[in-house]
Image: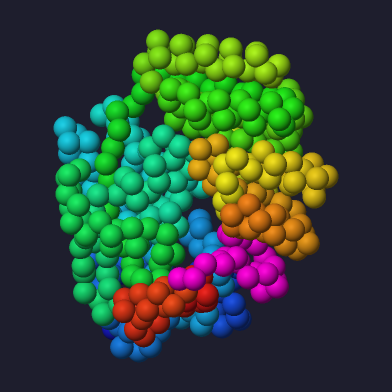
Amino acid sequence: MENLVDSNLDIIKWENISQNWQEKIERSISSENFPDYIVYPHDSENLSKIIKYARSHQLSIMPCGSGSKITWGGLKKEIRLVVSTQKLDRIIEHAVDDLTVTVEAGVKLADLQNILKDKGQFLALDPAYPETATIGGIIATADSGSWRSRYGGVRDMLLGISFVRADGAIAKAGGRVVKNVAGYDLMKLFTGSYGTLGIIQEATFRLYPLPEDSRTILLSGENEAIATATQTLLNSTLTPTAADLLSSGLVKTLEIDTDMTSLMVRFQSIAESCTQQTKILESIAKNLNLKTSLYQDKEEEKLWQRLQKIIRIPASTSSITCKIGVLPTAAVETLNKLTQLTNNSGLGLIRANSGLGYLNLDENIDTIKKMRSHLEKNRGFLTILAAQNQIKQEIEPWGYTGNSLEIMAKIKQQFDPENIFNPGCFIGKI
């Protein structure tokens, strides 16, 4: 490794890695064979050099950014190098008039949003760990958030990427303009690939103008009434930027003045539109005998920040964070099932329009199994994102029941024939 050391590359031996990094890495690997080094390239040339070196010496690599989500997915096997893109943090181009931005993979989303805000724009992603999440990690885990209801997921905003292949060559897909569709399927492939196909080096996104006004209305009440309000909202002409169903346990943890299943809806537009849409939803709630609470300005911002932290970030190392999916029509029933299984201690959030969401639970294997069974019966899934290693060894993390494993394995073989990128992390231990 000493042959790689130069001014554009930082190499730290395992014994010199900070305790925080060591703990995160230990929770993401399947054995006690800890990595030898963590490597921080400063440019694409050195990133390429590292990959070539690793391949020639048969060294398995764990790609990451700031490490906020390296514990997600399956346990990795025999990792020898951790390669962090954290210092690949340049803003390559911000085309203000075209509403696009091109950045390196190590740019933190929070830093990017601050830069874009000065130009009245934003990237419509609200992932877990919003202060530390990097662009590369967000793409690799397909981690979007509640804004997905209005703007779509990561791949819907991704216009182009460049990445380092297993042979060290730099490849590109897509472009830097909104209408460019070349390589679109390749961008879809890398979104949610968990670093198993290559290391993302650069990305281009579409942007949106910052909304003039924002307000959130919370509807709470009986399950049947909440389900009806949700379907009424989805069938209406209202255009919320977020519409999330919250379990009673989550509402209780948020310290909101209710202990019932709730629907949290956010409108962001010009002030007149937000006012009108809020009134319409309040009228719907009144007809269904639902309680409503309105949040604006700093109070609204704090509410969403607190929600993000509680549902997406484990409260302790023993907590289990899961990503789930279910038929939207079964969302309220699913949250009620969670309440019953956990005696109202389980935290659950499901997006009203897509049925995608998250669970945050205390360490309980039986509850995980029962929730996974319930979701699968409703054409859904449960994937364990973050949990103790023992949990992931006892319960297969992904819970995949589809018929595409053979195709996934062939894609992995084509992109990474030496199996050096995150071995064991993906579905089927790919």
Percent position (x, y) of residue 95? Answer: 17, 39
> Which colour assignment does the render follow?
rainbow
Which sits in the foreground, 190 or 39? Answer: 190
User: At 29% from the left edge and 28% from the top edge, which residue is drawn?
Assistant: 209
Q: Which residues are magenta?
A: 383-404
User: At 50% from the left edge and 20% from the top edge, which residue is drawn?
Assistant: 215
User: At 59% from the left edge and 77% from the top edge, which residue is drawn?
Assistant: 30
**Residue 297 visible at all:** no
Q: Quadrant of the N terminus?
A: bottom left
User: At 78% from the left edge and 62% from the top edge, which residue is drawn?
Assistant: 366
Q: Which of the 4 image quadrants contains residue 96?
A: top left
Percent position (x, y) of residue 138? Answer: 41, 53
Percent position (x, y) of residue 293? Answer: 63, 18
Is residue 390 on the magenta stretch? yes
Q: Which of the 4 image quadrants contains residue 285?
A: top right
119 horizontally vs 392: left or right: left
414 horizontally vs 60: left or right: left
Q: How many marks?
A: 0
Residue 337, above or below 7: above
**Residue 169 visible at all:** yes
Which sits in the foreground, 112 or 425? Answer: 425
Is residue 388 on the magenta stretch? yes
